[in-house]
Image: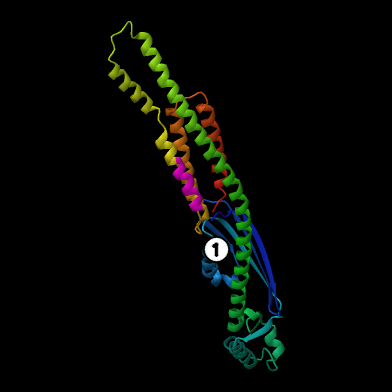
Amino acid sequence: MIKSMTGFATVTREDERATMTVTIKSLNHRYLDLQLRVPQSLAALEVDVRTLVGKRVARGRVELSLSLQLRQVPGVEVEFNAEFAQAVAAALDRAREMGLVGGALTPGDLLRFPQAISIRDRQPSDDDSQQDALAAQACDVVSQGLAELDTMRALEGDHLRADLDERRTLVADLVERIAAAADEGRSAMEQRIADRVRELRTDLQADETAVAQEIVRMAARSDISEEVARFRAHVSHWSALSDSAEPCGRKLDFLLQEMNREVNTMGSKADGLRVSELVIAAKAELEKMREQVQNVE
């Protein structure tokens, strides 16, 4: 199946707990290159997110960003440092015995010491059940974002396939025209050689059987039927790869290299007035196909 490696998706999910937004962008790359940005409170989800991406994307650079904004008002945690307070009280008792201070230690006195009492916000995510709910919601949002990304990449892939199929048909037609021109060129070459031999026959005592064998050998050297047959097989293989459910970008790229190699061989072997022109046109189309295939997953 032909899918584009480029795509974009963004999904926002809101409820009474939090607002989550996932943004996913994919670009061309030889392999799967995943760049993640997730909140520290959801850092444990990185492995799960990578697994989700791997199920949807086989190749390309994927930039995934997940943001989290909690809606609930944070609670408060107050921590009393009993050991520190006892040490302060003991020090004050000694000071009283020495007549340096008077009066009892009050709560206000303790609040003046930051080491005695610490106050911090307690985020809802600190609660295990709340954290589990946020993690499940995050995975759901990422899954939805990947589904939308996949839809966009499939639509782009449809456009790529239409263009590639059109060019493949054009190249296949050019190769058939090369084969026809090569046949005409080979027949013309055989006729030229035969005519030349007849002209020289009066001056040279030539073995007609040997001459005929040489003509056949020269014609065989310019025969491109094997290259044309292999090219036709590559065209059929192209259709099979495009219809397969598996990602096919790298295989299509390799197949184009083989198709280009066959066309080059045709150009070097075939003889004919229009062969060179047709070969150049075919190679130009194959290059355009190669550029498009770089966008295929």
Q: Image point 69% across, 80% down: which residue?
A: 74
Which residue was labeled with disc 1?
Answer: 56
Question: In the figure, is residue 213 to the left or right of 258?
Answer: left
Q: As rendered, which of 146 and 258 lies closer to the eye?
A: 258
Give the quadrant of residue 188: top left
Depicted 200 relative to depicted 67: above or below: above
Q: Image point 34% across, 25% down: which residue?
A: 216
Give the quadrant of residue 9: bottom right
- First to last magenta residue range: 231-241
Q: Tag 1, which secondary structure?
A: helix
Res. 39 in view: no
Residue 203 forms part of the magenta stretch: no
Res. 46 in view: yes
The percent position of residue 177, horizontal first and vertical second, equals 52, 33
Q: As rendered, which of 131 and 23 lies closer to the eye?
A: 23
Main SS, magenta region, reads: helix
Tag 1: amino acid: Arg
Count of numbered marks: 1
Give the quadrant of residue 100: bottom right
The percent position of residue 1, horizontal first and vertical second, equals 53, 56
Looking at this rendering, what residue extends furthest in the top direction? 203
Residue 235 forms part of the magenta stretch: yes
Can you say which quadrant of the picture contains the C terminus? bottom right
